[in-house]
Amino acid sequence: QVQLVESGGGLVQAGGSLRLSCAASGRTSSNYAMAWFRQAPGKEREFVASISWGSGVRYYADSVKGRFTISRDTAKNIVYLQMNSLKPEDTAVYYCAAKIGPSTTTTMREQYPYWGQGTQVTVSS
């Protein structure tokens, strides 16, 4: 079992920045991949970014490429999502997720068995 707890959400103006954190505990290992998803009101949960826990290989959705950066601190067991140049359309609940297996190109939510509770990000125009 893996437990995930997100933090760092909030309200920010368009063009601003936020950094989300996801603290992982339990049976984490270098054979895991971590990801961020988001869900806006009335929309499906969508993939944002992923990172291989062991190698650090990253993968991004086209909508956030060049603006968001995913990283991890293996000593602290924390995954970060640095979000810059935020837009109103980035408003959503952001979820941290984990799966067994290092592949980072898995973007389907069904492939991730472990989830955090989510943190709200609101970008005002």
Image: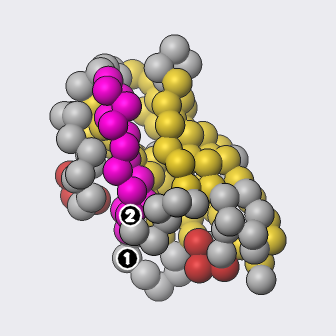
- Is there a contact, CB below 8 Å, between mark 2 and mark 1? no
Q: Residue at x 47, y 85 (%)?
A: 42
| Amino acid type at image mark 2 | Ala
From mark 2 to mark 1, how far is it between C-alphas?
15 Å
Q: Quadrant of residue 22?
A: top right
Question: Above or below — where is 94 with respect to 13?
Answer: above
Q: Residue at x 47, y 62 (%)?
A: 65
- In-front residue for pair 11/104: 104
Question: Above or below — where is 101 with respect to 90?
Answer: above
Q: Quadrant of the C terminus?
A: bottom right
How crowded pointer 1 is (Cα within 10 Å; few <14, some 14-19, many 20+) is rated as few
- Give residue 8's position: percent from left, percent from top: 69, 47
User: What secondary structure is found at the residue carrying circle 1?
Assistant: loop
Residue closest to the far front: 66
Question: Label 2, on which residue?
Answer: 61
In primary-sequence order, the first of circles 2 and 1 is: 1
Q: Quadrant of residue 54?
A: top left
In the rendered view, does 64 fall on the left or right side of 27? right
Q: Main secondary structure of the magenta part?
A: strand
- The tally of labels here is 2
Q: Residue at x 24, y 25 (%)?
A: 31
Question: Label 1, on which residue?
Answer: 44
- Give residue 68's position: percent from left, percent from top: 55, 55
Q: Which stretch appears magenta?
A: 46-61
Residue 123 in view, yes or no:
yes
In the rendered view, does 68 fall on the left or right side of 24? right
| Amino acid type at image mark 1 | Glu
